[in-house]
Image (tube, grey):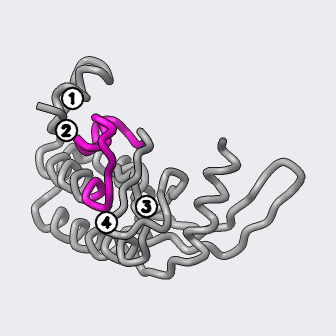
Amino acid sequence: RDRLRTKVERDILADVNHPFVVKLHYAFQTEGKLYLILDFLRGGDLFTRLSKEVMFTEEDVKFYLAELALGLDHLHSLGIIYRDLKPENILLDEEGHIKLTDFGLSKEAIDHEKKAYSFCGTVEYMAPEVVNRQGHSHSADWWSYGVLMFEMLTGSLPFQGKDRKETMTLILK
């Protein structure tokens, strides 16, 4: 399963060239493993920065969201649903610009009419249509984008239950 996700990630990154998406430089395979050589980014990730600062200024949030919107829009134009948008998957370069990474749960070849049905992602960032398994499309990424915006502005998640089940119930209300 991990090898399949790594292959999906390799295939997607081989096709994507965008300033706000991590760049695949090289991929190679041994008998049991597939290795991806990606950008080395010294700025850490958004999760660590958010953990330290609790919440960001409106200026920082606008900056990150603008870059993120451009990156997501590019992926969607290629028929890719990202499906795991969260602070841990947003890396920062030395200048503070974002790079989306971890495409293992992404779905390729999805036009705006088709839907995916896998239950995947991080529950707190899942769109209602992912939680209730009714099929989801690119719009699920924009839901996660809104959750991320809320978190960056307030320092907390909009839907946080005592466990996964309660969190899913809150999302569906």
**Residue linked to disc 4:** 113
Identify the amino acid type marked 1.
Gln
Q: Position of residue 96 (x, y in %)?
A: 35, 70
Q: Position of residue 87 (x, y in %)?
A: 35, 50
Tell me which numbered mark, 4 or 1, is placed earlier along the sequence: 4
Q: In the picture shown, does residue 136 fall above or below 160?
A: below
Nearer mark to the viewer, of 1 and 3: 1
Tell me which numbered mark, 2 or 4, is placed earlier along the sequence: 4
Identify the amino acid type marked 4.
Glu
Tell me which numbered mark, 3 or 2, is placed earlier along the sequence: 3
**Residue linked to disc 1:** 160
Q: In the picture shown, does residue 107 fall above or below 71?
A: above
State the separation of the CA atoms marked 2 and 1.
6 Å
Q: Nearer the viewer, residue 57 or 119?
A: 119
State the separation of the CA atoms marked 2 and 4.
30 Å
Secondary structure found at label 4: loop
Secondary structure found at label 3: strand
**Residue linked to disc 2:** 157
